[in-house]
Image: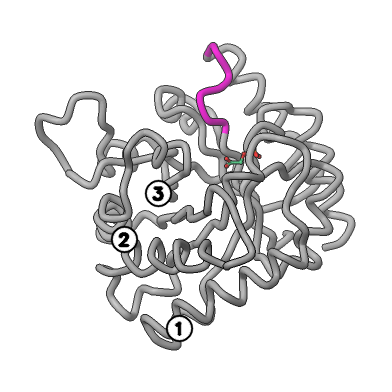
């Protein structure tokens, strides 16, 4: 099995459960043909049934967001125990599309800690909206990491997954240059080791933002990443299969 982790973030797609079943079947077949470690993050309303229908072991399930509260009067939220019961073992935390709707670094701090306490692996997303020559974005990323990890017990640091997703690269067909990602991976690791100790050296870093069937292999080869977070291409069964095929060629 390829060690590259591929997170399929379906976002708010597809529009019907019928189509979700079709997309999941296409994903499942692709994973059987090109063995890979795929984590599917469907809309939460589809989770339980997709999980119940799946009998294999290669695909694991992920929430796109979770509440840090375990229960209570929080209209519209989904708790970790609920998502876990529906089949998740991973949870995306702090995706830029959640942050755009008001999620703060403080929220991610609580969600990361709550996920760990619930034995769910958090995938903490960080990424800047823009870059300029002054390198201000590095401070921005550092702050997101500092706060996001603040409540993580030292022994658990390496069980968190960091997904670097520059907002300016999300949603198109042109990803960040692998060599720039390589630099960012070094920065992320160095920052976390500096703040929270050596345990951070072995944590997994993913890249997300316009990953497709043509650029995925280069990013894994030259970007110093353990995997990829794939948005719109993961909602197209044919393109996602081609992406897994290309990754399998270099495994
Ligand atoms: P994209 O989305 O692959 O469509 O750029 C990535 C993401 O937002 O997770």
**Residue for point 77% across, 58% down:** 177
Query: The residue tagged with tag 3: helix, strand or loop?
Result: strand
Provide the residue span drawn in magenta. 10-16
Q: Classify the position of the C terminus by image quarter.
A: bottom right
- At which x and y percent is residue 153? 28, 75
- At which x and y percent is residue 83? 33, 38
Do the CB atoms of the residues marked 3 and 1 lie less than 8 Å apart?
no
Q: Residue furthest right?
A: 249
Disc 3/disc 1 C-alpha distance (Å)? 21 Å
| Colour convention of the picture | one colour
Mark 2 vs 3, N-terminal side = 3
Disc 2/disc 1 C-alpha distance (Å)? 19 Å
Q: Would you name the residue on which mark 1 appears?
A: 193
| 24 magenta-colored | no
Disc 2/disc 3 C-alpha distance (Å)? 12 Å
Mark 2 vs 1, N-terminal side = 2
Query: The residue tagged with tag 1: helix, strand or loop?
Result: helix
Which label belongs to residue 116?
Answer: 2
Which is more toward the observer, 18 or 53? 18
**Quadrant assignment, res 231:** top right
Distance from mark 1 CB to nearest ligand 1 atom below 8 Å:
no
Q: Residue furthest front?
A: 134
């Amino acid at each position: 099995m390829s060690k590259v982790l591929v997170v399929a973030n379906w976002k708010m797609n597809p529009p019907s459960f019928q189509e979700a079943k079709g997309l999941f079947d296409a994903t499942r077949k692709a994973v059987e043909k090109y063995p890979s470690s795929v984590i599917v993050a469907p809309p939460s309303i589809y989770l339980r049934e997709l999980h119940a229908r799946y009998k294999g072991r290669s695909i694991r399930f992920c929430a796109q967001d979770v509440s840090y509260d375990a229960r209570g009067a929080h209209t519209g939220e989904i708790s970790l125990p609920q998502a876990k019961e529906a089949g998740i073992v991973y949870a995306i935390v702090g995706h830029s599309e959640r942050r755009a709707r008001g999620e703060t670094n403080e929220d991610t701090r609580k969600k990361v800690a709550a996920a760990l306490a619930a034995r769910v692996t958090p995938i903490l997303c960080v990424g800047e909206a823009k870059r300029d020559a002054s390198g201000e974005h590095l401070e921005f990323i550092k702050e997101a990491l500092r706060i996001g990890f603040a409540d993580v017990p030292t022994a658990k640091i390496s069980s968190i997954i960091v997904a670097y997703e520059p907002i300016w690269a999300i949603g198109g067909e042109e990803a960040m240059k692998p060599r720039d990602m390589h630099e960012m991976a070094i920065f992320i690791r160095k920052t976390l080791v500096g703040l929270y100790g050596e345990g951070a050296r072995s944590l997994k870093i993913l890249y997300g933002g316009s990953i497709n069937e043509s650029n995925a292999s280069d990013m894994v080869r030259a970007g110093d990443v353990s995997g990829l977070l794939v948005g719109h291409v993961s909602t197209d069964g044919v393109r996602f299969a081609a992406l897994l095929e290309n990754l399998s060629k270099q495994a």
